[in-house]
Amino acid sequence: MLRNSIFTILLFVAVTLVANAQTVSICKEFIAGKIIDLPKPIYTSEAKNAKVDGKVEIRVKINENGDVIATDVISGNPLLLETSLEAAKKAKYTPQMCDQKPMVTDGIIAYNFVLPIVEKYFVTEKIADFTDLNSDSKYFESIFFLTENLKIAFGSAENKFEAEKNLTRGEFVEFLFKGLNLLEERGKLSNKETKQFGIYKAFNPKQLKTFSEIKDFDELRPYAVSMRNLFEKFNIVFVNEAHNFNGNFPMSQSEVIGYWKEVFGEEALPVNFRNDKLKVINRGDFAIFLAESLEILTYKLLPE
């Protein structure tokens, strides 16, 4: 009687293949089947958002040609099963040979889903925690205001603010969402609804209906949560004609001013920032811009 061979595949962030076969005692000459193609199962957003991970084991029947002809679940979280079964059905092996004849065999495919590590910004409420800022910096006063007064400053994972670094679209969204939340909190204290009082307005020129329409969204990026919340809470989203966000692209001063004007209006623009289409704005200059603009906007929310 033939003994079944076991195929084990471990899926981490990338696929790692580990194959081993038990000897088949009835065969004088036994050649184990080998993995030719092993499609990677999709780790769905639903499963990741639910913080579901762990092992899924699928039993497969493999015919004489090395094709999977039947699958059955052994174990695994229900949120991980559908894509695991779909991937297992597409697996391909070389035939297992017993005395030079191909044989039908059973196997096990095991996928180990591991939740991805999400990038994060360094967030602090003390400017001294930013290791690259000195009090003689031209940006110090504005960053101090954003950090210790407004509590919305953030930097890199190395505990640096990186004032001279170009501002990216992702960082702009992070600052914008933090700023809007701050304004909403100030509005509640004054019994003033921010949208009703003209503090901001929705900006969705491509008329996206769902967040999934953004084609290059990467949930591992540090701005991912703010990007999603900005759309779902405020109906504000910045995408091009192809519905790409391009979160790592640097922003020009003109682009920052244009978006800010669309969301907050002309009067929220600091007077000393001119519309320079060619100038790429850095994080320090944007800190000055943001601090001045939020002072204007929070003044509008003061109790009457």
Image: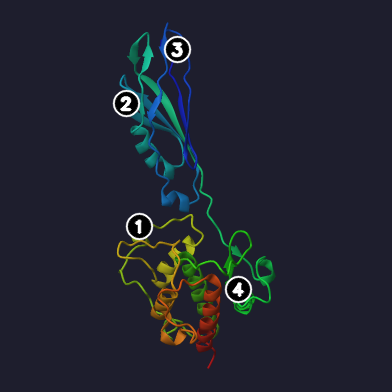
Q: In this view, does 27 lie above or below 238?
A: above
Residue at 34 percent of width and 18 percent of height:
104
Along the viewing direction, whichever of 49 and 274 lies nearer the viewer: 274
Mark 1 vs mark 3: give the one in front: 1
Label located before the other in sequence (4 or 1): 4
Residue tagged 1: 215
Between the residue at mark 1 and the residue at mark 2, the CA separation in whole angstroms equals 34 Å
Q: Is residue 284 left or right of residue 237?
A: right
Rendered location of residue 225, percent (x, y)? 48, 62
Between the residue at mark 3 and the residue at mark 4, the CA separation in whole angstroms equals 67 Å
Quick one: which residue is furthest to the bottom in this view? 304
Q: For the residue marked with disc 3, what is the amino acid?
A: Val
Quick one: which residue is furthest to the top in this view? 28
Residue tagged 2: 67
Along the viewing direction, whichever of 224 and 130 lies nearer the viewer: 130
Label located before the other in sequence (4 or 2): 2
Mark 3 vs mark 4: give the one in front: 4
Between the residue at mark 4 and the residue at mark 1, the CA separation in whole angstroms equals 32 Å
Q: For the residue marked with disc 4, what is the amino acid?
A: Lys
Residue tagged 3: 24
Label located before the other in sequence (3 or 4): 3
Asked if marks 1 and 2 touch (Cβ < 8 Å), the reply is: no
Rendered location of residue 227, percent (x, y)? 45, 65
Q: For the residue marked with disc 2, what is the amino acid?
A: Asp
| Residue 239, numbered circle | none
Residue at 43 percent of width and 42 percent of height:
80
Asked if marks 3 and 4 touch (Cβ < 8 Å), the reply is: no
| Residue 151, numbered circle | 4
Q: Is residue 105 above or below residue 133?
A: above
Check disc 3 and report its element: helix, strand or loop.
Answer: loop
